[in-house]
Image (cartoon, helix red, strand yellow):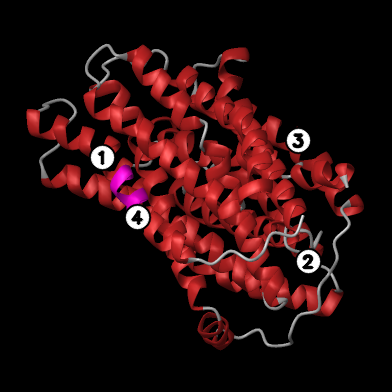
Amino acid sequence: MKAQLLIYSLIAMPLAVVGLPLYIYLPTFYATEVGVSIGMVGVILFIARFSDVITDPFIGILSDISLNKYNSRKPIMFAGFLVMIVSFYFLLHPGENYPALYLFIFSVLIYFGWSLVNIPYLSFSSEISNLYYVKTKLNSFREISTILGLVLALSLPYFIPEDLIQEKLYNLYILFLVLFIPFFIITILFLQVKNNPIENDFSFFKLKTIYSQDPNLFSFQFGYFLNNLANAIPATLFLLFIEIVIADKTYSEVILILYFFSGVLALPIWMLLSKKIGKKRVWISSILLASTAFFFVLFLKEGDVMAFGIISIISGLSLGADMAFPTSIQSDIVQEKKQNSGLLFGIWTMITKLSLAFSVMVTFGILGLVGFDKDNLTALSVMTLTLLYGLAPIILKLIALFFINRYQEKEIIS
């Protein structure tokens, strides 16, 4: 089983690497080096991301159909593997005549390809083993691999410094290929999945039956949405907060790396604790830890880099648990139902992406209402930024706890 844990975790690393340039570097590359207007870039990427949210449940159904027809979800993943490699390449090499069209077509395709790989991949966590604690290990190993991928992507500019964003993107693409091609082949060939029988009903009407049979499922998923939104808001505002409130962005990448490493180091402890008190209680404990640490953000002022770093490290301790245990609980739920697991994980990834979309809409919308202007700051705009970054996540997490606590976790079977 140890070999299977390692094999299962491999793909998460390159998937994390490809996510960073899409969210951080790609918009700036097209707006500054390619010459597409910043407004057009924003509109195109919003449409691409929204299309990704809509397609996830359909890809979940497609994954179930693949399992029913071919006794495997891997054909869907192979299609996504090819789409990702090709579309990532063309995103970095836009045509001179229609660069905006390149951005639109290939950003939609790379999100689509990413989902084709990721949704069946998440479904495996409910199909590799029936054991409660093994599913915890599977999800934890996957999230450790995800965090390591993010750290690799964040560290790459330090080892290979480049002035042009296109060159940084190209280096990330090479790193992506070096990791993705061999790891994907190993996973396809050697990952042993117990393909549970599923019903031959792939319609969305099935969801009504599933949710009516388990009323706590909606409560659990809504709690997950609120908690994920609470995590996404500071991630969206991180660069603005450290530049404007802390007024020193020199160590921004270092703080992020420490935050992620903190999550990796703490996750084995959370895993051991889950054996004694269960996944839900561990997840709740991690939420309370992050909320307590983030409370002190409200007292930060200019120059408090060290204090901000300490808060980031402490809140980072909850990162691994916050990433691994909700999906592990979802795996338990899906495995118990033994039906439409692809669709249910498609809904799961849709919820994740909706929280990311809402975080941008809510934060930038509120900042816009108070007249936020980075070049002409007011006391109101700085206070609003601080409250959004430090207080809003705490409030959302406390509300999320109410819904998460309503979910009745099944008896622990190690």
Report the Cα–Cα distance between label 4 and label 2.
Answer: 30 Å
Q: Earlier in the sequence, mark 4 or mark 3?
A: 3
User: Is disc 3 surrounded by few (<14), some (14 to 19) or many (20+) residues within 10 Å?
Assistant: some
Label 3 sits on a secondary structure element that is helix
Q: Name the residue under label 4.
A: 358
Q: Is residue 396 magenta?
A: yes
Q: Mark 3 points at which residue?
A: 179
Q: Which of marks 2 and 3 is in front?
A: 2
Residue 180 located left or right of residue 369: right
The percent position of residue 89, horizontal first and vertical second, equals 64, 42
Q: Earlier in the sequence, mark 1 or mark 4?
A: 4
Residue 293 located left or right of residue 300: right
Read off the magenta span.
393-399
Q: Mark 2 points at which residue?
A: 73
Report the Cα–Cα distance between label 1 and label 4.
Answer: 17 Å
The quarter of the displayed image where residue 377 is located? top left
For the image, the number of numbered tags is 4
Q: Which amino acid does label 4 sit on?
A: Phe
Residue 247 located left or right of residue 292: left
**In contact (CB < 8 Å): disc 1 and disc 2:** no
Query: What residue occupies the far right of the structure in this picture?
Result: 190
Q: Nearer the viewer, mark 1 or mark 4?
A: 1
The quarter of the displayed image where residue 126 is located? bottom right
- Image quarter of the C terminus: bottom right
Q: Which residue is drawn at 27% across and 19% down?
A: 246
The percent position of residue 58, horizontal first and vertical second, equals 59, 73
